[in-house]
Image (cartoon, helix red, strand yellow):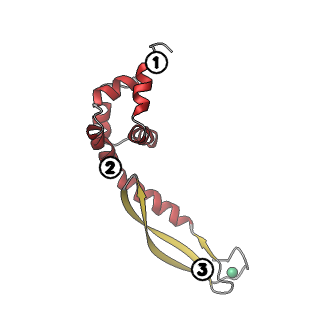
């Protein structure tokens, strides 16, 4: 492989394990770096992104479980959230069992960080 800086054709591939955290859930992935012997430049390899995404997908059920488990501590019942958001009953249970999309995960994250938004939403008259 060629170095993007000096063009030398002796990029050495190095791997190291990186730790990442998403909402207090830790997971690790393998970072792949190409290091140039000539100029010392190092660059991220495409494999890093792939490894990260795979590790994140693998950690996702734990993240979803933590976020949903925390709802009870926040005194937010699942039926209440489903009613306020206007989503089908037992949807949150479905997320727990079957997993959820990235968008649904973001929604859970927002509820986790700003539960007061649910109360605000609940106060908006229907049809608006
Ligand atoms: Zn170089």
Q: From this viewpoint, which residue is outermost toward the bottom? A: 38
> What is the quadrant of residue 19 in the picture?
bottom left
Image: 46 above or below 112: below
In-front residue for pair 104/122: 122
Task: For the N terminus, give its image quadrant.
Answer: bottom right
> Pointer 3: what residue?
35
Q: Which mark is residue 124?
A: 1
Q: Residues within 10 Å of mark 2 (few under 14, many from 20)?
A: some
The correct choice, above or below, for 99 with respect to 125 in the image is below
- Distance from mark 2 CB to nearest ligand 1 atom below 8 Å: no
Disc assigned to residue 15:
none
Q: Nearer the viewer, mark 2 or mark 1?
A: 1
Residue 53 as seen in the image, left or right of residue 72: right
Where residue 20 appears, as percent x and y from the top left, is 43, 62
Q: Is residue 49 above or below residue 94?
A: below
Q: Residue at x 48, y 76 (%)?
A: 15
Q: Quadrant of ligand 1?
A: bottom right
Q: Is residue 40 rendered to the left or right of residue 127?
A: right
Left or right: 102 with respect to 70? Answer: right
Of marks 3 and 1, which one's residue comes earlier in the chain?
A: 3
Residue where numbered disc 2 is placed: 61
Q: Kindly state the secondary structure of the residue where label 3 is placed.
A: strand
Q: Nearer the viewer, residue 127 or 9?
A: 127
Which element is circle 2 on? Answer: helix
x, y percent for residue 115: 39, 35
Is the residue marked by circle 1 packed among few (<14), some (14-19), or many (20+) residues within 10 Å? few
Observer-side mark, 3 or 1, equals: 1
- Residue 26: percent from the left, percent from the top? 37, 60
């Amino acid at each position: 492989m060629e170095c993007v800086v000096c063009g030398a054709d002796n990029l050495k591939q190095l791997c190291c394990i990186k730790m990442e955290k998403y909402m207090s859930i830790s997971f690790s992935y393998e970072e792949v770096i190409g290091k140039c012997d000539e100029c010392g430049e190092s660059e991220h390899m495409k494999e890093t992104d792939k490894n990260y995404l795979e590790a994140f997908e693998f950690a996702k059920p734990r993240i979803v479980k933590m976020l949903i488990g925390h709802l009870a501590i926040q005194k937010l019942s699942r039926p209440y959230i489903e009613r306020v958001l206007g989503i089908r009953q037992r949807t949150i249970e479905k997320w727990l069992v079957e997993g959820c999309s990235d968008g649904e995960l973001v929604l859970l994250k927002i509820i986790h960080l700003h539960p007061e938004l649910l109360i605000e939403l609940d106060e908006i008259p229907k049809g608006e």
